[in-house]
Amino acid sequence: MLASGLLLVALLTCVSVMVLMSVWRQRKLRGKLPPGPTPLPFIGNYLQLDTEQMYNCLMKLSKHYGPVFTIYLGTRRVVVLCGYDTVKEALVDQAEEFSGRGQQATFDWLFQGYGVAFGNGERSKQLRRFSITTLRDFGVGKRGIEERIQEEAGFLIQAFRDTCGAFIDPTFYLSRTVSNVISSIVFGDRFDYEDKEFLSLLRMMLGSFQFTATSTGQLYEMFSSVMKHLPGPQQQAFKELQGLEDFITKKVEQNQRTLDPNSPRDFIDSFLIRMQEDKNNPNTEFYMKNLVLTTLNLFFAGTETVSTTLRYGFLLLMKHPDVEAKVREEIDQVIDRNQQPSCEDRTKMPYTQAVIHEIQRFANVGPFAMAHRVTKDTRFREFFLPKGTDVICMLGSLLSDPRFFSTSDDFNPQHFLNDKGLKKVDAHVPFSMGKRSCLGEGLATMELFLFLTTIMQNFCFKCSPEPQDIKLSLNHEDFARVPPNFTMSFLPR
């Protein structure tokens, strides 16, 4: 009895000390950090945040505290940046200081700082340089990858023709097609559209991607240290991420058995060759863990964002048939009906390019971007950000900035047009900016143009509700914006 009483006293004393230390640390930094709502010990600003509408909640806080403010996601201190000037100042003007990768709790469960997207310091630099060079070696940014996209577009067109105009959910049609482009680079081959393992991979990617956009996903960002041990949807997301890693590991093992160092077939081969070259280098970042997780980074990122943007694009075009008609008219004027669209056509199609930019802006698939982290004690404007502070850059605040987009709440391709044709808008940064911007931006831009124009060259779209009744409300809207489920018909022209 006495022992249990002493244990209880010790436990309460320990908790009290932790609370006092937490409060002391927060007060010590209070005068230096950007302003923000007062946090509570352990739960931080949970009571002031709406996990159902995290993006909108943070935007409201920015109106009260300004474009630079501090929040606590549980015990995790995060500085939030809003607006073009603020984000550019951090990611471009002070690029090195903001070049770290911050916490992304769901994905960190698997990646744990490995791979090109989640690595930091020298690891990130080495893997990024290698990935960019190797993607170019396999045709990204060149005619080779354009031909690969055109070939895959042909498979997609046939798949849509086979539906005979029936109403279908386009989700997996698009993700199969987009994924096959990056698959041909990282794995050296495409998947058959009916391949059961391929469809399972796509479901795992979609499921884990969508989890990050849910209320539970946002809750996990705050309390991952506890929630990772509890039952709930997060366990399914972990299972899906583990399934993806297992698949990549199997692919790597297959490549190891048949590797020819003089003739790399794909990204995996190139990485394996570099591993052999660096085997005596104690500081190398080229080893198995980084190979598996960098390959998964590329496979995942090269599938979900482009396919989700295209899916939202279809919905927007059906909602705005006048825009759809103008795009199709420009396609018919510039491209012969018996000719596939090519990247050379882009310069002659300003309206189509403006529509694609506006789809990206309005869809705003990644409104937060991935979290950054300051790599050293940093002065930013009049504030002090201690080394290791996580930073969330609200890319959505740039894409909806009325200074750059006069009707930011509306779908309006005129945002990107002037008397001379297509115009550049500085705040249009759907792939982020600076040292950690998306390394697949060039590939994604090419895919969006070629897939959309090829589909519209061959089909008209039809949705069961009338255009004015089409709902654009999102399934989820947090780390990722997920468009609503819908069906549509592809009618051959």
Image (tube, rainbow, N blue to C red):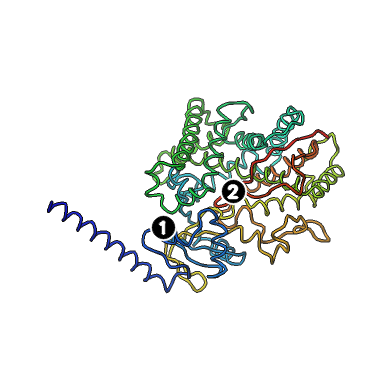
- Lower position in the chain sequence, tag 2 or tag 1: 1
In the foreground, 223 or 423: 223
Q: Which tag is nearer the camera, tag 2 or tag 1?
A: 1
Residue at x 86% of width, y 38% of height: 336
Left or right of 236? Residue 162 is: right
What secondary structure is found at the residue carrying circle 1? loop
Q: Residue furthest left?
A: 2
In the foreground, 419 or 290: 419
**Which amino acid type is marked by label 2?**
Leu
Instruction: From the top left corner, tell me how far across and down residue 355 is, in percent.
Output: 75, 51
Instruction: From the top left corner, tell me how far across and down residue 234 is, in percent.
Output: 45, 43
Residue at x 53% of width, y 56% of height: 54
**What is the quadrant of residue 463 in the picture?**
top right
Measured along the vertical axis of the image, is residue 87 above or below residue 466?
below
Q: Is residue 375 visible?
A: no
Q: 10 Å neighbourhood of mark 2: few (<14), some, or many (≥20)?
A: some
Instruction: From the top left corner, tell me how far across and down residue 261 is, in percent.
Output: 52, 31
Measured along the vertical axis of the image, is residue 417 above or below residue 69?
above
Residue at label 2? 439
Calculate the distance from the C-alpha at mark 2 to the C-alpha at mark 1. 31 Å
Left or right of 105? Residue 1 is: left
**Which amino acid type is marked by label 1?**
Gly
**On the rendered image, what quadrant is the C terminus found in?**
top right
Left or right of 171? Residue 492 is: right
In the foreground, 129 or 420: 420
Q: How many marks?
A: 2
Residue at x 55% of width, y 33% of height: 201
Left or right of 198? Residue 10 is: left
Q: For residue 74, which numbered disc appears in the image?
A: 1
Q: 10 Å neighbourhood of mark 1: few (<14), some, or many (≥20)?
A: many
Q: Is residue 269 visible?
A: yes
Instruction: From the top left corner, tell me how far across and down residue 330 is, in percent.
Output: 84, 46
